[in-house]
Image (cartoon, rainbow, N blue to C red):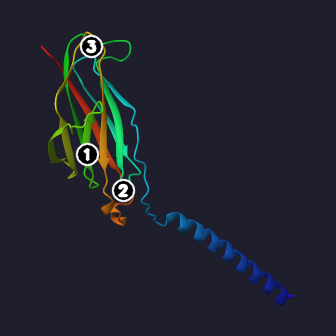
Amino acid sequence: MSRRRRKINLYKKIILIIILLMFLLLVIKGTLARYSSSGQSEANVDVAFYLLKEEEISQTIALEEMMPSDDVYTYTFSVANNDGTDRTETALKYTISIKMTTNLPLTYELYMNDGTENLFQNYTTEQDEYGTYFKTITANEETFGFETNEQNTYKLQVRFPKEYNSVDYQGIIEALEIKVNSEQIV
């Protein structure tokens, strides 16, 4: 009887070890790093800035799931002198600046209303109090009147060159803040 009991205990241990190994394989498989070079080239951020008075408006966006590619990632946003109901009561001038982290080797271009001229003029790099570096790019000043509804649609094109298809850049997220600063024209 004790010999039979030992066999049963041995089979139980073997089955338990097999179950533990399968569980361990599932857990390890889920944590293994994978790097892929596919990506999407069009993404709409669907951000709209309504300038109804003199103010500074900003929106932070995380550029997730960017993969090194020959494709261009395009993010669109718009700036308007109305919100569909109300319109600014004075003429406004505004500037767009984009502040981004420097985690990835990305290049940025900004185009307005299907134009072909890159609007980014002024590039600066600064370090914050925590030692993090940020790049800020500022576009030329634009103006809106107050007599009719006006809107400018912008395309922010981001490039992540294929040459950076390396494990070193895996899982890193780039964040950017689009800031619109408006002032009344006196």
Q: In terms of secondary structure, where does tag 1 sit?
A: strand
Residue at screen point 30% across, 33% down: 114
> For the residues carrying marks 3 and 2, which lies nearer the camera in this image?
2
- How many labels, in total? 3
Where residue 147 sits, quadrant-wise, is top left
The numbered dot on residue 88 is 3
Q: Is residue 119 above or below residue 55?
A: below
Image quadrant where one finds the N terminus: bottom right
Where residue 145 sits, quadrant-wise, is top left
Q: In terms of secondary structure, where does tag 2 sit?
A: loop
Distance in Å between CA atoms under marks 1 and 3: 30 Å
Residue at screen point 38% across, 52% down: 66
Q: Is residue 26 above or below residue 126?
A: below
Left or right of 125 in this view: 47: right
User: Mark 2: which amino acid?
Assistant: Ser
User: Mark 3: which amino acid?
Assistant: Thr
Extreme residue in the right direction: 1
Image quadrant where one finds the C terminus: top left
Q: In terms of secondary structure, where does tag 3 sit?
A: loop
Residue identified by numbered label 2: 69
> Residue 81: horizontal and vertical position, in percent?
28, 18
